[in-house]
Amino acid sequence: MAIISIVLPTFNRENFLKQSIDAIKNQTFKNWELIIVDDGSTDDTIQILESLLLDINNPVKIIKQENQGPAQARNNGIKKSQGEFVAFYDSDDLWLSDHLESCIGILSKFNEIDWLYTACKRVDLQSGDIFEENSFYDGATPKSLFSLNTETHDSLHIIKDATAAEVSITHGIDSCFQASVIRRSVFKNIQLPNFRVGEDRLFITMALKAGYTLAFNDKVNVIYNVHDANISDTNPNADIHKRVQANQRLVDSYILTVKYIDNLTSIEKKALNQKIANEIFWIIGYSLLWNNGFRAEAFKAYFRALKLNPLSLPYWRTIMSSFIKLLVKA
């Protein structure tokens, strides 16, 4: 039995396939099986894969499905997996050669860890510009995941914090699937929500609320390529309305959280409501719409958020300031 099942969903990524398959071939850890789920590609994905896979001796499965999105593609790949661990790989990103070996080394040593993830470097695919050297930091400032109580072993942090789900909802704990290795036993009890955007963030909270132990290793193992075809809002140079749409899909996934997690505490529910309101007001309304000149649409977003949090003074101050600026320009 292969110890790691690599699940690689792909949709119209023919230009990325060689680098992604090469990165798998170049892994220093060799005991893996590869499960590729073609999510209804209309390009030459299958033909290119057949050529790229010829010299691979490890077990390989190709699953073809109608386009259903990455979450369902991953779920279908998991169902066909045989390994003790599952590693997700996005076909447009790049694993560093020691990714699997370093993760398996930690998971083999610390049996209590159910889900291990590392940091990513975010790079503009076209220009090569680096957006983020390490996804766990804002510049040199550690992100919220470092505020959690953890058991620390050098760069490894095993989360031991009852507030982890609340932090995950409010700020995120910066776990991304393509930098994760997860014990297959996790998927016996929970499955990825079938969303096109936001399924990963919800699944993290689902895992925490189900009692699984997550850990993060402060090490960059993955190059996350930012480009125009990204589904999520990762490209700051993308069309504004595309970014609004991606963020609205994220909001929709937050709204559905209570359908997937029935044991949220009152504090976590309050945090979720605030997260939804802030996403609508500050990200969609202010950052994307107002700052890019879409005034009427911005006000619609403002008032949507106010229905969720009508007593927010920062909301009201921003609305009044925006209104005054409109009057002055008029």
Image (cartoon, rainbow, N blue to C red):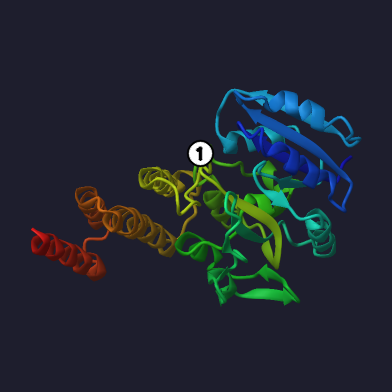
Near-viewer residue (159 or 321): 321
Q: Position of residue 135 (x, y in %)?
A: 59, 63
- Residue 177 horizontal side relative to residue 82, left or right: left
Q: Give the image quarter of residue 146.
A: bottom right
Q: Quadrant of the C terminus?
A: bottom left
| Residue 197 at least partly seen | yes
Name the image quarter holding the N terminus: top right
Measuring from the top left, give residue 164's x and y in whole percent: 55, 66
Q: Position of residue 172 (x, y in %)?
A: 51, 61
Q: Residue at x 22, y 66 (%)?
A: 318
- Give the residue furthest to the front: 127
Picture layout, residue 115 above or below residue 58: below
Q: Which class describes the residues within 10 Å of circle 1: few (<14), some (14-19), or many (20+)?
A: some
Residue 133: give x, y in percent of width and height: 62, 66
Relative to 105, is 47 above or below? above
Residue 81 in sight in this render = no
- Is residue 230 or residue 319 the one in the foreground? 230
The answer to which of 179 and 204 lies nearer the viewer is: 179
Q: Which residue is mark 1?
A: 196
The front one of 16 and 274 is: 16
- Up the image or down, 146 lies above or below 118; here it is below
**Residue 36 in the figure: left or right of residue 246:** right
